[in-house]
Image: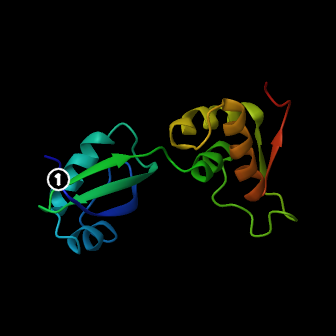
């Protein structure tokens, strides 16, 4: 028989660096979950991605047990890494802060494909390129495909 789900918790945690301090501790403690167990399991699962911000969806069951799914890093973070910038533009329509190539956009789209709501790589590339434009990044080069 399946366990009854009582709720979900969404967090963004750096890979391999989960600690019981805020925001993880209070978010899981309010649901009555074992914080250290989550930290150990998460750190073991993400030790190959140190420092990357990873979204995690924690499913809380009625017996205070939990399960979690680690998603791919946000497209915005991957674009900032590719452009070697710290943050996006405050006025992306007026002030461009940098650029990324279509090859970078395609690589990011392939990485994000499992978490995006599209079926074709062309659609994923368009979504990532739109994110880049909304951050004040210009996409340079020839569009693949």
In the picture of the structure, the residue carrying the numbered disc 1 is 3
Up-down relation of residue 127 to residue 96 (above or below): above
8 on left or right of 53: left
The 10 Å Cα crowd at callout 1, few under 14, some 14 to 19, many 20 or more, is: few
Q: Residue furthest front?
A: 1
Residue 72 position, x and y percent, is 48, 43
Which colouring convention does the figure follow?
rainbow
* 29 lies left or right of 125: left
In this rendering, would 131 be left or right of 119?
Answer: right
**Location of residue 64 by image quarter:** bottom left
The structure residue drawn at horizontal position 68% and vertical position 44%, both measured from the top left corner, is: 128
Q: Nearer the viewer, residue 12 or 67?
A: 67
The structure residue drawn at horizontal position 67% and vertical position 53%, both measured from the top left corner, is 85
Question: What residue is rendered at 75% in x and 50% in y?
Answer: 130
Point out residue 111 in the picture as x, y percentages from the top left corner: 55, 35
Residue ID at (66%, 31%): 120
25, above or below 134, in the image: below
Image position of 133 (left or right of 12): right
SS at circle 1: loop
Please state, as top left, top right, bottom left or bottom right, where the C terminus lies in the image. Answer: top right
User: Please, is residue 1 above or below residue 136 in the view?
Assistant: above
Q: Residue 106 at x, y = what percent?
A: 68, 32
Residue furthest to the top? 145
């Amino acid at each position: 028989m399946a366990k009854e789900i009582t709720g979900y918790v969404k967090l963004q945690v750096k890979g391999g660096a989960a600690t019981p301090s805020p925001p993880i501790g209070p978010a899981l403690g309010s649901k009555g979950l074992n914080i250290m167990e989550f930290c150990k399991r998460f750190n073991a699962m993400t030790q190959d991605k140190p420092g990357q911000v990873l979204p995690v969806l924690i499913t809380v069951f009625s017996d205070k047990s939990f399960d979690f799914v680690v998603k791919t890093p946000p497209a915005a973070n991957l674009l900032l890494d590719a452009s070697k910038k710290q943050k996006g533009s405050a006025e992306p329509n007026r002030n461009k802060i940098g650029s990324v190539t279509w090859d970078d956009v395609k690589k990011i789209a392939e990485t994000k494909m499992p978490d995006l709501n599209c079926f074709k790589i062309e659609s994923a590339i368009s979504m990532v390129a739109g994110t880049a434009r909304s951050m004040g990044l210009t996409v340079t080069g020839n569009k693949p495909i």
